[in-house]
Each structure stands twice: as C-alpha cells, then as structure tokens.
Amino acid sequence: MNEINGFVPRRIFLTKGKGVATTKLVSFEMALRDAGIAHLNLVRVSSIFPPRCKIIKPVVGMEDLRAGAIQFVVLSENATNEPGRQIAASIGLAIPEDRNVHGYISEHHSYGETEKKAGDFAEDLAAQMLATTLGLEFDPDKSWDERKEIWKISRKIVRTINVTETARGDKDGKWTTVVACAVQLP
C-alpha cells in the first residue's frame, strides 16, 4: 500500500483562529495564521476520527509542522463582511470507549450562535454520527442533554469535545473570517 493511501493519523490536535481584512481571501489567510497553520498546504478530508488516535496539545503538534507541507485537516470556516454579524466555526469530536473503533469529527459553521451553542451543536453532530454507527438509540426530538445521558449510560461514547471560534463582523465592513480545525498527524 502506498504511503498516501495508507496514511492513518495517529495524532490530532485542534486549533482555531480569526482574521479581518479588506478581502475575503486575506481574512481567511489571517484566520489560518491566527490558528498557526497558514504555512501549510491544507487538504480537507472527511470526518473520521481514526482508531487509537491520540488528541495532543496544539503546541506539541505544531512542532512537527513544516512550511509547505501537505497537511490533512478537517476544517470548518465562516466569513462575513456584514458589520456586527455573529459568525461561528466549530469542530466537534465524538470518541468511542473502544479505542479500536473509529469515532467522528464534525464541522459546523453558523450565524448568530454563541461559542457554546455552536460548540455543543458540533459535538452533538459528531455524537449522532457515532451513535448511529454503534447502533445506539438516536431520537432527534430529544434534547442534547437527554441524548448525551443515553450515550453515557450505553458506555459506548466516552466523550465529546469541540473547538469553536466566533467573531462579530468588522464594524467597518471588512471581511471577518473564523476557522476551527482538526489537524491530523502521523
């Protein structure tokens, strides 16, 4: 199996950032800089948290990043040039108790949500995907707290976490961008 097709991340770190500039592209670049990952060639991947993967601190993971490297990430982003508009970008993780089973990473971006609301929703999305894979009961009409309790009782979902960045659109109408990211490492 070649190295690219067979790459399974063993470590992941979460990071976030925000940027403001006169153009959308530059505000995105500034958000990536704030997150510490602008010097990388980012490749977006889908939402699987690999079996036996370890979550590490960003400062530890960034030590292994080299300028220009092709880096696999799960990335959520949002932008606005509307003054005062609330934006959010969030990554949620749901990690199974059985570390030999994959978990899920979700991306959520929204308008008008607080950091807590966006983060909770991202965790809920990841937990829903994992719960359905594990054959656990999922009722979309139950509250997040009720579903979380069911998942705790089942002992199949060990924890959920998120990283979320929020901002209000620049008062002068410059582009404001927020990013949240799960960076995958060997």
Image (spheres, rainbow, N blue to C red):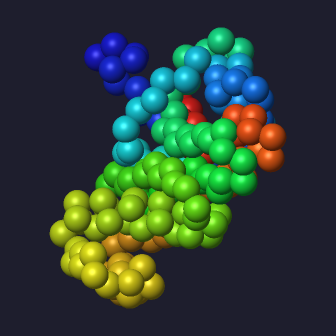
Q: Along the line of sight, which residue is nearer the eye, 74 or 84?
A: 84
Q: Is residue 136 left or right of residue 183?
A: left
Identify the residue at the far left of this view.
135
Q: Along the line of sight, which residue is nearer the eye, 81 or 147?
A: 81
Position in image of residue 71 (x %, y %): 55, 24
Q: Is residue 143 left or right of residue 171?
A: left
Q: Along the line of sight, which residue is nearer the eye, 168 or 71?
A: 168
In the rendered view, tell whether residue 109 sits above or below residue 27.
Answer: below
Which quarter of the image is occupied by the N terminus? top left
Position in image of residue 180 (x %, y %): 60, 45
Q: What residue is rendered at 47% in x and 52% in y?
A: 108
Position in image of residue 175 (x %, y %): 70, 35
Position in image of residue 24 (x %, y %): 65, 27
For residue 166, which quarter of the picture? Answer: bottom right
Q: What residue is rendered at 34% in x and 72% in y?
A: 156
In the rendered view, tell whether residue 115 sits above or below residue 173.
Answer: below
Q: Is residue 60 left or right of residue 40?
A: right
